């Protein structure tokens, strides 16, 4: 087993701006109507986009490994969330997405059955999908 530790940093700046330090730093923010400056995607959009991006990346890795002529993968991700719970208006429900829907368009010379098998392998090897499906230990530590 080859375990790697990945690290990113986040720092709340003015209003809702969060600076992310990683291999390619970026900003996460909230829209202006939610008190932010709309300088970047909000955290929920980052989560959903990380799922889509991971599916694309794992698909590319598998295609290279299996010598599949993959032209592209187009992924659309939708998630349902209870914003009343998120905003503290209720304690019933949960703060996370209650359902995620992922729509893949695989552009490759493959039959429908081959694409379905390819999609299943992508889903089983995608770390972001795995974290959405399975419980991962979360250890908050005050420093």
Image (cartoon, rainbow, N blue to C red):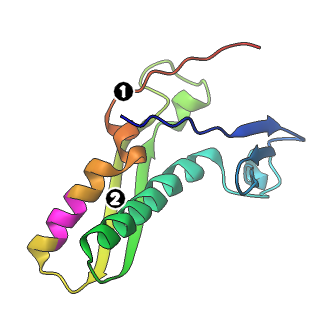
Measured along the vertical axis of the image, is residue 139 above or below residue 126?
Answer: above
Residue at x 53%, y 48% (from the top left corner): 47
> x, y (%) of residue 110?
17, 81
View extreme (top): residue:
142
Assess disc 1: are there few (<14), some (14-19) or many (≥20) residues with their C-alpha within 10 Å of its C-alpha: few
* Quadrant housing residue 6: top right
Q: In terms of secondary structure, where does tag 2 sit?
A: strand
Q: Say whether residue 16 is visible.
A: yes
Residue picked out by circle 1: 135
Q: In terms of secondary structure, where does tag 1 sit?
A: loop
Q: Does residue 116 belong to the magenta stretch?
A: yes
Mark 1 vs 2, N-terminal side: 2
* Quadrant housing residue 131: top left
View extreme (front): residue:
1
Residue at x 51%, y 53% (from the top left corner): 50
Closest to the observer, 133 or 1: 1
* Quadrant housing residue 74: bottom left
Which region shows up in magenta?
115-120
Measured along the vertical axis of the image, is residue 95 above or below residue 79?
Answer: above
Assess disc 2: are there few (<14), some (14-19) or many (≥20) residues with their C-alpha within 10 Å of its C-alpha: few
């Amino acid at each position: 087993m080859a375990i790697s530790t990945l690290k990113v940093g986040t720092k709340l700046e003015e209003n809702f701006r969060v600076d992310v330090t990683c291999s390619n730093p970026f900003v996460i923010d909230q829209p202006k109507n939610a008190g932010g400056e709309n300088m970047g995607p909000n955290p929920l959009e980052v989560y959903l986009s990380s799922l889509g991006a991971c599916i694309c990346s794992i698909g590319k890795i598998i295609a290279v490994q299996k010598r599949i002529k993959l032209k592209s993968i187009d992924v659309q991700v939708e998630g349902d969330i209870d914003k009343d719970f998120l905003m503290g208006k209720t304690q019933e429900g949960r703060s996370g997405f209650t359902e995620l829907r992922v729509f893949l368009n695989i552009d490759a010379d493959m039959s429908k059955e081959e694409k379905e098998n390819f999609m299943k392998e992508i889903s089983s090897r995608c770390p972001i999908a795995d974290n959405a499906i399975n419980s991962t230990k979360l250890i908050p530590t005050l420093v």
